[in-house]
Image (cartoon, rainbow, N blue to C red):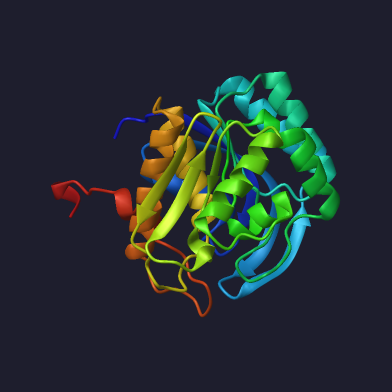
Amino acid sequence: MKIKSKILIIAGSDSSGGAGIQADIKSVTSLGSYAMTAITAVTAQNTTGVKSIIPIPCKEISSQIEFTSKDIKPDSVKIGMLHSTQVINSVLISIKKLKLKKIILDPVMVAKGGAKLIDDNAILVMKKKLINRVDLITPNIPEAEILTKMKIKSILDMIKAAKILLDLGAKNVLIKGGHLGIKPLKDIFVNKKETTIFTNKKIITKNTHGTGCTLSSAIASYYGCGKTLKKSCELGIRYVNNAIRTRPNFGKGNGPINHLNSFIIEKKFR
């Protein structure tokens, strides 16, 4: 398989392999792109929850981003877990210094098990400084509620929340509808020119650990290859839905999805 694009991933590590940097690398690789990383935190976690979070020093995060990108220039960037104001500011400085383009932000705030992954001051800085520097923000409903300070109970609420995020400076917003509890599943892509609703069958399962990380990395992969942002969202959603549908049944809690669902194995290796 020929490598299609180069993706820089700025995110935290998940020791269980279902989310974070590990899920990002698996997603980018399985979609035919090349993954580079800047790790912002190391977590000890499994499918039942997060045991501990050890932050990486800001200077080291910046070094990872800058030293890597000066040698191998990324075609797009995926940003995940940024747990403090200092980390966000460091990442912003590096992004500006390197003039990085095609940036996808997954505003990771709460783990599947309920552990909080970002502090309140960092959320304010994200809203004021980071959202307007990226091409797309991909919150789920709880994250969108935190960012907009409104309750989301319907499709109309999702659209209203997306427009609030546009007013905060976002260029494009993809709000994921998995937490809405309706069938079929609806994800909403909004910018100042259009509103698109992606509709897919809702798969009932507890094995959805890392879906947000996976989706944003898949979108970054397609976007880095030259597809439009809207098309990248559509293809990324399809990839994640297939990953949920073919999920392995690992762990006692919220299990991982199948990042290898896009692989077609050559006959000689079967």
Kindly tell me whether residue 121 is visible in this rendering: yes
Q: Determine whether, in the image, residue 136 is placed left or right of residue 248.
A: right
Q: Is residue 38 above or below residue 45?
A: above
Which of the pair 152/31 is nearer the observer? 152
Question: Quadrant of the rendered structure where residue 171 is?
Answer: top right
- What residue is shown at x 54% (from left), y 53% (from top)? 156
Left or right: where does residue 80 sit relative to residue 149? left
Residue, x 66% and y 19% (percent of image)? 99
Residue 200's spot in the image, x, y percent?
Answer: 35, 56
Q: Name which quarter of the figure residue 96 lies in.
A: top right
Residue 34 can be seen, yes or no: no
Q: How many marks?
A: 0
Q: Is residue 101 left or right of residue 82?
A: left
The quadrant of the picture occupied by the N terminus is top left
Q: Is residue 62 or residue 172 the one in the foreground? A: 172
Say left or right for 29 vs 143: left
Quadrant of the image for the C terminus? bottom left
Report the residue that reaches farthest toward the bottom. Answer: 252
Is 151 above or below relative to 216? below
- As drawn, 142 above or below 207: above
Q: Quadrant of residue 32?
A: top left
